Image (cartoon, rainbow, N blue to C red):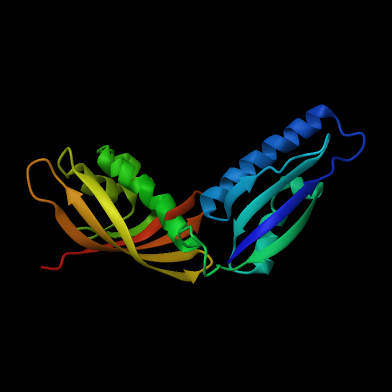
């Protein structure tokens, strides 16, 4: 689910400028963490009156209770009052931003693609959990070291272009994606494969914990 949150902050009387600056820094760091986890999608600042501290945030969470857990984890909550409005899709919405699950998948798959295109095996490996099961077109491996070795064996100039076909939210911490991927080469035809991934929410953000390629002739 997605929620629009009106966040109004009131700084306690007598708070020093240094304390306010420290709170802003902590809030910015936590906001970045929540964005990496797929909970914080957007932030806006409305027209403000002199001295007013107010923001609108677009958040994603499985339900209102888990949204409250997310909001309570933000440092500014100690000074802030939040007004939450649950959102549902409008049938006439002209925009197609994708579902929360698609945004989670794209967050990690865009990093994966960038590292593949740059022939950066360690960068690709950073997109995977420590216990990730990886099945490319070679025998399977477990963990980032095997992922890095697989992509190190691929030819220079290989690039990847993916399209998300299906998504499923398996749990709060797990999202399944089914994709079509075109791997392009400098010296051979494009190789099109089907790819299933399971992404898992970790303390490092969303990472791939299962990667399974299939090639249908």
Residue 40 vs residue 210, the one in the foreground: 40
| Residue 69 picture location, percent across and down | 68, 61
Q: Residue at x 68, y 35 (%)?
A: 25
Image position of 204 (left or right of 210): right
| Residue 89 picture location, percent across and down | 55, 67
| Residue 54 visible here | yes
Image position of 61 (left or right of 194): right
| Residue 137 visible here | no
Which image quarter holds the N terminus? bottom right
Residue 128 vs residue 55, the one in the foreground: 55
| Residue 175 picture location, percent across and down | 44, 65
Image position of 152 (left or right of 127): left
| Residue 208 picture location, percent across and down | 38, 56
- Residue 154 drawn above or below residue 175: above
**Quadrant housing residue 5:** bottom right
Q: Residue at x 72, y 61 (%)?
A: 84
- Residue 171 drawn above or below residue 190: below
Q: Residue at x 78, y 40 (%)?
A: 53
Image position of 24 (left or right of 200): right
- Residue 213 drawn above or below residue 56: below
Which image quarter holds the C terminus? bottom left
Q: How many marks?
A: 0
- Residue 71 drawn above or below residue 157: below
Q: Residue at x 92, y 37 (%)?
A: 13
């Amino acid at each position: 689910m997605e929620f629009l949150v009106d966040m109004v902050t009131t700084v306690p009387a007598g708070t020093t400028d240094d304390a306010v600056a420290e709170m802003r820094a902590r809030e910015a760091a936590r906001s970045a963490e929540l964005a990496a986890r797929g909970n914080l999608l957007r932030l806006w600042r409305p027209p403000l009156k002199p001295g007013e501290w107010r923001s609108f945030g677009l958040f994603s969470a499985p339900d209102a209770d888990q949204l409250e857990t997310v909001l309570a984890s933000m440092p500014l909550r100690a000074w802030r009052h939040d007004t939450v409005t649950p959102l549902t899709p409008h049938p006439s919405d002209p925009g197609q931003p994708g579902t929360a699950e698609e945004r989670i998948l794209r967050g990690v798959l865009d990093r994966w693609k960038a590292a593949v295109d740059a022939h950066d095996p360690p960068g690709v490996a950073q997109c995977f959990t420590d216990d990730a099961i990886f099945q490319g077109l070679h025998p399977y491996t477990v963990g980032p070291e095997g992922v890095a070795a697989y992509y190190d064996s691929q030819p220079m100039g290989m690039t990847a272009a993916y399209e998300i076909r299906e998504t499923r939210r398996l749990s709060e911490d797990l999202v399944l994606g089914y994709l079509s991927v075109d791997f392009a080469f400098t010296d051979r035809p494009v190789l099109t494969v089907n790819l299933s991934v399971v992404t898992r929410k970790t303390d490092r953000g969303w990472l791939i914990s299962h990667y399974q390629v299939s090639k249908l002739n």
